[in-house]
Amino acid sequence: MLSTITVLETMRIANRLAERDVFAWSTASEDGAPVRSSLDMAFPVDGPLGNPRSGSIILVCGGTDVQATASRQTMAWLRKCISHGVFVGGLCTGSYVLAKAGLLQGRRVTIHWEQSDSFAENFPDVDLSTAPYEIDGGTLSTAGGTAGIDLFLEVLRQSGQSTLAHEVAAQLMYVNIHDLQARSDIRRPSRMKVRNSKVVAAVTRMEASVENVVPIADFADHVGVSVRQLERLFKTYMGGTPTHYYMRLRLDRALRLLLQTDMTLTDVAFATGFQTSSGFARKFRERFGHPPSKLRR
């Protein structure tokens, strides 16, 4: 709901301040019936899936159960629309639907961080970003939250309406927030509170080394400290050792892959840096209290 409303409000305010229709929009569902939103409220739409004119943009908004709701009917409709000169975009987890429909090969897009691991595994031919929003040619995407505001402020700027974009941000009380979000990274929200640059750099390197595990000494070398110094920094800022944090990072990714993909347990183990399924299952059980096979069932 937040992703949908922020986009609609940004367009509405742009029209009001410009005193003309800078944007025009309509909402749709597969059958034209109201959609049950994340707030468990019925969200009314203007009608069923139709035939948008060439040059328009279809924005697909997805939620936590996007894999289950990416229907064949919607994906076939999206493919038909894009073949007739329509652009597409994904809000929150909407990029999953577009990728599943085969519309994002070679495109740079973003998605909500909870879905990023499974997205990367399922769609290796898509350039997955960690930015709050992306515009790659005619493809738009956000990682959820308030990033829809940032996306459409950028749409205004790219269309030569920078002054209007600033006025819209001011109307939304969003000027300072926008400046901060433009520099943010959505990969690991838990580290956003960390203000030590060496810890952040080490964590960033760990996130990029989940499948191909490297020794802790490599992370220490990367940030220019000794292993013992890195351990002290992690104890201070992360509440534990680098080894413990690295293992939790890998197991948390394994959990998301088990919940969001149909990968085999062996494939999940290899994708998170474990050499054997038994070793993976043992560590998983220690972390979550039950084996991965039980979770998959």
Image (cartoon, rainbow, N blue to C red):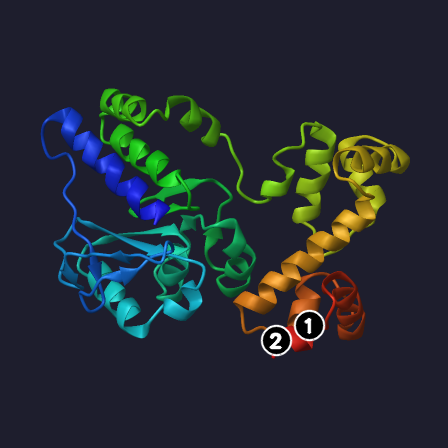
Left or right of residue 284, residue 85 in this image: left
Total numbered badges shown on the rendered structure:
2
As drawn, which residue projects farthest toward the left? 20
Q: Which mark is residue 292?
A: 1
Residue bearing the label numbered 2? 296
Residue 221: image x %, image y %? Answer: 81, 36
Q: Is mark 1 on a helix, strand or loop?
A: helix
Quadrant for the C terminus in the image: bottom right
Q: How crowded is mark 1: few (under 14 residues within 10 Å), some or many (20 or more)?
A: many
Q: In this view, does 291 lie above or below 185?
A: below
Q: Identify the amino acid type marked 2.
A: Arg
As drawn, which residue projects farthest toward the bottom? 297
Q: Residue at x 42, y 22 (%)?
A: 176
Q: What element carries label 2?
A: helix
| Residue 227 location, quadrant | top right
Residue 188: image x %, image y %? Answer: 60, 44
Q: Which residue is drawn at 26% across and 35% down?
A: 10
Q: In this view, does 63 lie above or below 19?
A: below
